[in-house]
């Protein structure tokens, strides 16, 4: 019958619609909040900021390396002769010892031996020339009685009890020398201390 066919067709249509609705519900995954679309300019601006920061850090590091290298070269030039200067200090010490052995009145007394007088003058001239050369290359002699005792510049070989001037140099055993601002040999002294 045509009515039976209609009912079958409508029944089939109803079943197909229900199946489609069921399959659509099954295909639906639990709803997740949708992320808003990311603006590409925001991402690009963040990347530009990051790259700028990296470039600035690289430039700063390069400047630091350049500054350190320059300082190292300057120090190498300034202190290249340190070992030679230290060796020459022994010569200066020998000249001082030679002068201390000659009697003080040897050059003033008329009866002094001429050869002793000449020897003293020769030692004095040699010592003056050596000190002039030291000065030319930045080597300075230091260490005198009554200087303030500085452990970075003085080696205290012994203590001298003195209530009047504690913390000062009481006796100099060996002079100290500096090359520019560096101590190349500390002055060997007797330091005054509280009794």
Image (cartoon, helix red, strand yellow):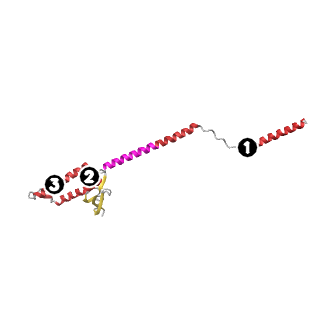
| Residue 112 magenta | no
The residue that label 3 is drawn on is 122
- For label 1, count other residues whose C-alpha is less than 10 Å away and answer few (under 14), some (14-19) or many (20+): few
- For label 2, count other residues whose C-alpha is less than 10 Å away and answer few (under 14), some (14-19) or many (20+): some
- The residue tagged with tag 1: helix, strand or loop? helix
Depth check, front residue: 147 or 90: 90
Quarter that holds the C terminus: bottom left
Q: Nearer the viewer, mark 3 or mark 2?
A: 3
Does residue 155 appear left or right of residue 16 in this picture? left
Depth check, front residue: 165 or 127: 127
Image position, residue 156 (x, y; %): 30, 61
Asked if residue 8 can be seen in this view, the reply is yes
Image position, residue 45 (x, y; %): 54, 38
Magenta stretch bounds = 57-78
- For the point 31% across and 49% down, which residue is it? 78
Furthest-right residue in view?
1
């Amino acid at each position: 019958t045509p009515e039976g066919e209609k009912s079958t067709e409508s029944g089939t249509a109803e079943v197909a619609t229900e199946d489609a609705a069921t399959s659509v519900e099954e295909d639906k995954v639990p709803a997740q909040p949708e992320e808003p679309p990311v603006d590409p300019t925001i991402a690009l601006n963040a990347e530009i900021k990051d790259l700028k920061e990296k470039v600035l850090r690289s430039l700063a590091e390069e400047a630091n390396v350049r500054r350190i290298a320059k300082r190292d070269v300057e120090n190498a030039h300034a202190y290249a002769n340190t070992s030679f200067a230290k060796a020459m200090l022994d010569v200066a010490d020998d000249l001082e010892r030679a002068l201390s052995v000659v009697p003080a009145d040897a050059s003033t007394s008329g009866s002094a031996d001429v050869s002793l007088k000449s020897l003293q003058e020769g030692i004095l001239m040699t010592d003056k020339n050596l000190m002039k050369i030291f000065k030319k290359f930045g080597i300075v002699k230091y260490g005198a009685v009554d200087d303030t005792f500085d452990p970075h510049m003085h080696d205290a070989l012994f203590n001298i009890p003195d209530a009047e001037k504690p913390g000062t140099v009481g006796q100099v055993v060996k002079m100290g020398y500096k090359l520019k601002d560096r101590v190349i040999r500390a002055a060997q002294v007797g330091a005054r201390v509280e009794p």
